[in-house]
Amino acid sequence: MKKMKQTHWKSNKINVAIQVLPEAEGKLKYTLVDEAIAAIENTGFKYKVCPFETVVECTFQDLSGLIEDIHNACKTAGTEKMLTNLKIQVNFDDDVTIEDKMEKYS
């Protein structure tokens, strides 16, 4: 008998640290990064901009759409090439929130 995969954890909130490194001839990289942040803001997900990356609180199920939105926004802004680094924190039993990690620093 095959064991069924449990997927309920995919609807829990996760934290994703997203770093985009866009390249475009004659364009300021910070301007292109601003487009990525605007794409994140437009999703309505909770997020926090940090010096090297932006942390987003979403579900695992929302992740691929989020990354697609970011890449489309950067491409539209003139990005020719882009390296994207992700760090994903998942708790299989509960939500992961930005506040959980940041509350003692607020």
Image (cartoon, helix red, strand yellow):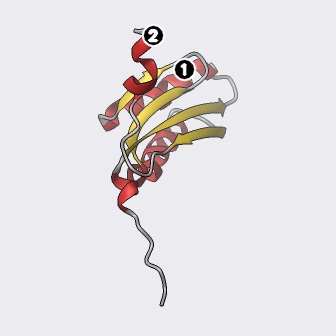
The answer to which of 12 and 85 lies nearer the viewer is: 12
Give the labeled residue for mark 1: 31
The residue that appears at 47% across and 52% down in the rendered structure is 64
When the figure is inspected, residue 86 is found, relative to residue 23, above or below; the finding is below
**Element under disc 1:** helix
Left or right of 31: which side holds 80?
right
* Local crowd size for mark 2, using a 10 Å CA cut-off: few (<14), some (14–19), many (≥20): few
Picture coordinates of residue 101, whole percent (x, y): 46, 24
Query: Disc 1 vs disc 2: Cβ atoms closer than 8 Å?
Result: no
Q: Secondary structure at mark 2?
A: helix
Closest to the observer: 29 or 99?
99
Residue pointed to by mark 2: 105
Q: Position of residue 54 (x, y in %)?
A: 51, 26
**Quarter where residue 25 is shown:** top right
Q: Residue furthest top?
A: 106
Q: Image point 43% across, 12% down: which residue?
A: 104
Exactly how many numbered labels are in the figure?
Answer: 2
Query: Relative to 28, is 3 on the left or the right?
Result: left
Give the camera-side residue of 8 and 79: 8
Task: Name the residue rendered at 54%, 42% in the picture.
Answer: 88
Q: Position of residue 37 (x, y in %)?
A: 45, 27
